[in-house]
Image (cartoon, grey):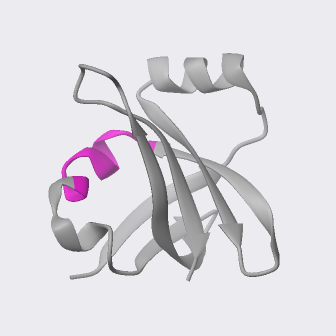
Amino acid sequence: MSYTITAQTRTEIGKGSSRRLRHAGKVPAVIYGAGKEAVSIEFEHRSIINIQTNDDFYNSDITIVLDGKEVKVRVQAMQRHAFKPMIEHVDFKFA
């Protein structure tokens, strides 16, 4: 199964800006690897909360539409809230 997430590039980086994003219902994330420069991104929490429950989400390539351009990635790490059903941060790796 293929998954697609629409994301935007983040301009503000840091703890405070990440907290503001989470409060606004967004998830901060980063894409890195393959000798390319790391890209900080943000996307809507509701776009990932349901699809991340599928097992193949972690093993298959995911398409991220980043500012109109498609990027193939895989999930490297995901940080979840301790007791709320909320994702706090995602690390993606270029596929």
User: Would residue 43 appear left or right of 3 to someone viewing this image?
Assistant: right
Q: Reply yes or no: does residue 59 show up in magenta.
A: no
Magenta segment, prevailing SS (helix, strand or loop): helix
Of the 4 image quadrants, the one containing the N terminus is bottom left
Of the 4 image quadrants, the one containing the C terminus is bottom right
- Residue 84 drawn above or below residue 71: above
Measured from the top left, where is residue 6 in percent x and y? 46, 59
- Return the residue nearer the eye: 12 or 83: 83
- Return the residue nearer the eye: 19 or 33: 33
- Residue 27 drawn above or below residue 94: above
Measured from the top left, where is residue 93 in percent x and y? 58, 70
The residue lying at 57 percent from left, 19 percent from top is: 19
User: Would residue 25 appear left or right of 56 to someone viewing this image?
Assistant: right
Measured from the top left, where is residue 40 in percent x and y? 70, 50
Q: Give the total number of marks visible in the rendering.
A: 0
Measured from the top left, where is residue 46 in percent x and y? 29, 42
- Residue 76 drawn above or below residue 25: below
The residue lying at 63 percent from left, 50 percent from top is: 41
The residue lying at 25 percent from left, 55 percent from top is: 52
Task: Give the quadrant of residue 83.
Answer: top left
Q: Which residues are magenta?
A: 44-52
Task: Give the quadrant of residue 13.
Answer: top right
